[in-house]
Amino acid sequence: MNEYQKRFVALLKTIFELDKSDLDFGIYRIINIRQREIVDYFENRLPKKIQEILAPFANEKTDEIKQKLAKIESDVESMGMTIDALQDNTPKKQEYIALQKQLSQGSDMSALESDVYSALYSFFNRYYDEGDFISKRRYKEGVYAIPYEGEEVKLYWANQDQYYIKTAENFKDYSFVTKEGINVHFRLVDATIEQNNNKETDDSKRVFMLYTENDERPELKTFEWNAESKELIIRFIFDIPADKKKNYVDDNYAKIREYIIGVPELMMPLMYQTSTDPKKPVTLIQKHLNGYVAKNTFDYFIHKDLGGFLTRELDFFIKNEVMHLDDLDTDNEVHAESYLAKVRAVKRIGKEIITFLAQIENFQRKLWLKKKFVVETNWCITLDHIDKSFYPEIIANKTQIQEWIDMYAIDEIKGDLNTTAFTNPPSIDFLKENQNLIVDTKNFPTTFRDRLIASIDNIDENTNGLMINSENYHALNLLSIRYNESVDCCYFDPPYNTSEGTFIYKNGYKESSWATMMLDRLNVSNRLMKSSAIQCTAIDDFEHSLLEYVSDTIFGRNNRLGNLAIEIKPSGRTNDYFLATSHEYINFYAKTYSEAAICFFPLSEEQKSLYSEDSDLGAHKWRDFMRTGGYSTPEERPNSFYPIFYSEETGDICLNEKPNYIKILPVDSEGKYRVWRKTQPSLLTHLANNEIRIVKRANNVYKVQIIDRIKEGVRPKSMWVGSKYDASSHGTKYIKSLFGESALFSFPKICTCSKRYLVYSSRRIS
């Protein structure tokens, strides 16, 4: 096995994760069981296939020819001459030329094999990246090609054709077996995780640390070695460290190394070098330790069509980097044939490996897309929906009563002539008088829950809220089964992908990880929405532009409704380098622009007071019929520029010139021509409804006015500013007022904002 073959086989073992014996599920279990055959395929059967393809075009006597050439050179040198100095007609020179020609017409098998292995290694090594296959179609050094079909604007990112898989909380024990039969187990004793959409900050970054033995759990040891069973257990925790400056990767390894050195049976099996790079030595235990930590601390992707993707990329790779026209433009047919055989070997072997990889990836994709089990379901039901025959059981449930005390302070209700006092347990009369108390079925046995749900007619139709605790992609897919094309409004509050509130992402793919995550979820949201529905997504400046591009991909640019900017921090962020950011956005998109409808906000008392006049059709005011501001000149609106004729004597208003009628044109205070608010046909309609009047102002100036009836509400503006939107007062402080100083979660949303843009987005919230 030459160095090129060794390098390629090592890469295949990494790609197929043959060193990760903890992956004991699905197709990986089969891989582990059949590991010997897989390794045999890589090391023996695969090389034989390559040799079979190349054999007809390889010169089997290459070594013999080279030896003859060397013998002639040696004989000539012993005579004190060189080959070039010999006469062309000498037997030695003629024999030497013939052997050279024979050598050039054939190809050395080992050289052909090395070329094939080198090409295959280059291809798979380029596209493989820590468990994923990333699109890297290289046109030439430093220049990459992307799929483009003539669009005016093309948005592309590295993980666009993959599913984003969140694994931040996927903690598993890790095991591997050395060739000497020693079983090594990494066990996680305890772990804490970040909550909601917020990535841990530098001050709250969690790391893997060796477990520290303590008196509370004396049975647990940091290291346990059983010489009889040949098992080594190393225990870890995953938490925020006390010393945030310490490098725990190095510290963990140093302590493990110290322990192993003290156990002679472990020294050789675990401390031998696995790295082929002498400048970067890595021991076996260190290699697995790095793999264990990495597996639990970054996310990965599942390709939507790995087989199709890699096949297309392999064809491009072969045409662009393996095949060269100059190699085909030759009179040496043998050389051209051997060259094509090399290309054929790269393609055939590459496709075999791609087929195998695609089977694994497709299996994982099926698992990811498979309908997930609902492991627990409970209801929160107010007492007015519950039959009174259940009241005795409810009263007897101490957990439920304590929950009411904690949440509603029912223990403070004092009795009087009209009110039943609280007792513990409360009386049935107390429950009858407090029908808004919520019974949470999680506090009761499943038998009680099932009887209660069965007693309520049309439970699904009467359920007016649904909360799902799940990974959000699968939660949306679960909703799509029942609520497909029936939701009025979807609101997303994704991680902002900033240093303060981001999410775990694949190293080097922060933006594309986020874009892929949003694309998948917005795509499901689009399926849930009615044709008249609206999508609202909260975001800040950091990913605002990328969110718009991704949303355009799903909903179409023509379905953009606008962006709402909200000043949530009037003082501005003090950690910003240039401008002190004080706002966030809500992006609005329609499922179908022409069918989307927004809800106006109610008029304030001050706004209502402006409509001081009244009629049979309700309150109204009069406004100037002349349009001012932008797009208000005759050149811009020629159909809205015309004279209006008015009889001061009779009050008649018309469009036809008549004797003794005053001609009125839209002229502003500076003497510039403007236009009317309506075209002539619209004016006649308003005249017929008595909605136009003319008043005489100072200096004999006549003003045309149109009636402005009181509105149902006011159209929301694109900028919200005011103390009621302050995230500190109405977010963080509000949460603390409800739950005390303990921070249940960071960066809470402002209730005022949430209510207002949900009302704005839908006349009836689903």
Image (cartoon, rainbow, N blue to C red):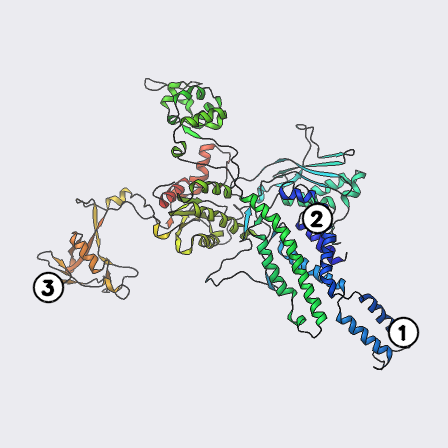
Q: In the depicted view, which residue is nearer to us: 38 or 246?
A: 38
The amino acid type of the residue labelled 1 equals Asp
The amino acid type of the residue labelled 3 equals Lys
* Residue at point 22%, 46% (across, down): 611
- Asked if labels 1 and 2 touch by Cβ distance under 8 angstroms, the answer is no
On residue 75, which mark appears? 1
Q: In the depicted view, which residue is nearer to us: 700 or 279?
A: 279
Choose the circle earlier in sequence order: 2 or 1.
2
- Asked if labels 2 and 3 touch by Cβ distance under 8 angstroms, the answer is no
Q: Position of residue 728 (x, y in %)?
A: 45, 41
Q: Classify residue 519 as left or right of residue 764.
A: right
* Residue at point 21%, 49% (across, down): 621
Q: Residues within 10 Å of mark 1 (few under 14, many from 20)?
A: some
Q: CA distance from mark 3 to mark 2?
A: 100 Å
Q: Residues within 10 Å of mark 3 (few under 14, many from 20)?
A: few
On residue 38, which mark appears? 2
- At mark 2, the secondary structure is helix
Q: Residues within 10 Å of mark 2 (few under 14, many from 20)?
A: some
On residue 658, which mark appears? 3
Q: Classify residue 668 as left or right of residue 515.
A: left
Quadrant where the N terminus lies? bottom right
* Residue 571 seen in the current view: no
Choose the circle earlier in sequence order: 3 or 2.
2
Q: Position of residue 250 (x, y in %)?
A: 69, 45
